[in-house]
Image (spheres, rainbow, N blue to C red):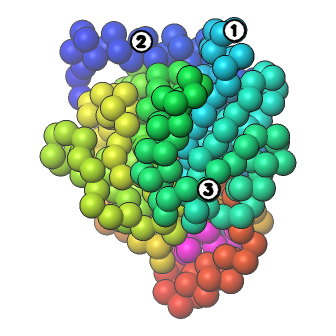
Amino acid sequence: MPHSPDQQALLEHYVKKILAAPVYDIAVRTPLQPAPALSETLGNRVLLKREDLQTTFSFKIRGAYNKLVQLSDEQRAQGVITASAGNHAQGVALAARELGVAATIVMPSTTPELKVLGVRSRGAEALLHGESFPFALAHALHLAEQSGCTFVSPFDDPDVIAGQGTVAMEILRQHQGALDAIFIPVGGGGLIAGIAAYVKYLRPGVRIIGVESEHSACLQAALRADERVVLPSLGTFADGVAVAQIGAYGFEVCRFCVDEVITVSNDELCAAIKNIYDDTRSITEPSGALAVAGIKQYVARSGVRDQTFVAIDSGANINFDSLRHVAERAAVCGVPA
Ligand SMILES: *Cc1c(COP(=O)(O)O)cnc(C)c1O
């Protein structure tokens, strides 16, 4: 995909913002770790970018901190408000506490309890509203308008996108050899936009593959329609990516930087959680396993061998009680590794 001068300028703009993002005040550089069993079974080398080990157990702290740190003194004094399916909420709560900013966070009433507790324990105010993210978002925007607080989008903001893009900067430093594709989970598109901008600017030959839940495939729908469509309904098993419309800023990048989008079922996610467990002895949340599920489908379909893939293991915030369901489905569908 050769880029036009305008597109190249957009990527350069993001690369500069990514390189300047002060995320390590609060975030850690996570390991890029081989998945030996999965690699062996798939006949391809799979590396996991362990964002499940990030502070707050997901990458969202990167974008949240990069956004909050750029606010003016006046904006900081007013406080911030956000809507989130849970992980961005915890990122904003922690970043706000670190910077001494008051934060109000609207989360869908279906948010796993540990994500709600993760917010409250970090001193932010958590409001539960609406059955899924779009309802929580509408409420948060309304409150922001009333109160004069700054609204912090979980994905549709250049500073958030740049913060998430620091994941790509680490990957390219940690792995300098051959790299065929990076598989990235997609909710509102902030993570994939940040990664895609950085990677397509520096290593345009590396394929950028988005992976979505088939119950919230808003990037695939937008790429097909060539505009941002609103999905009529959402499934929330993968609650971290249950977004009805891809973000405008992210889509501007994705439309020329994403090579392919794969959608996966809930059962494929359960099986992928098990694959990750087998290789790492760590549990991921459903959204965190999207990229591995995507690699499995990609290899099964294309039959490729001996390639090197990175999967973003994006989060680990799953209620302990949900593990029963995950283990059952992984066993029932018996999807081999
Ligand atoms: C937010 C999130 C995603 C998706 O990120 P977007 O920037 O919304 O596309 C994926 N996985 C987890 C665990 C998340 O919390």
Q: Looking at this view, name the residue that lies furthest to the bottom.
A: 332
As rendered, which of 209 and 124 lies closer to the eye? 124
- Mark 3–mark 1 Cα distance, whole angstroms, equals 28 Å
- Mark 1–mark 2 Cα distance, whole angstroms, equals 28 Å
Tag 1–tag 2 contact (CB < 8 Å): no
Q: Which residue is mark 2?
A: 12
The three-letter code of the residue at mark 3 reads Leu
Q: Which residue is mark 1?
A: 73
Whether residue 141 sits left or right of residue 312 in the image: it is left
Query: Where does residue 141 sit, x and y in percent of width and height?
Result: 47, 36
Q: Residues within 10 Å of mark 2 (few under 14, many from 20)?
A: some
The three-letter code of the residue at mark 2 reads Glu
Whether residue 304 sits left or right of residue 178 in the image: it is left
Q: Residues within 10 Å of mark 1 (few under 14, many from 20)?
A: few
Q: Is 49 drawn above or below residue 3 in the view shown?
A: below
- Mark 2–mark 3 Cα distance, whole angstroms, equals 39 Å
Query: Where does residue 194 sit, x and y in percent of width and height?
Result: 48, 29
Q: Is 166 drawn above or below residue 337 in the view shown?
A: above
Whether residue 175 sits left or right of residue 140 in the image: it is right
Q: Residue at x 67, y 76 (%)?
A: 322
As rendered, which of 239 and 280 lies closer to the eye? 239
Query: In the image, which residues are magenta?
Result: 269-278
Q: Which residue is mark 3?
A: 128
Looking at mark 3, is its residue's CB closer than 8 Å to ligand 1?
no
Asked which secondary structure carries label 2, the reply is helix
Asked which secondary structure carries label 3, the reply is strand
Query: Where does residue 28 sit, x and y in percent of width and height?
Result: 77, 33
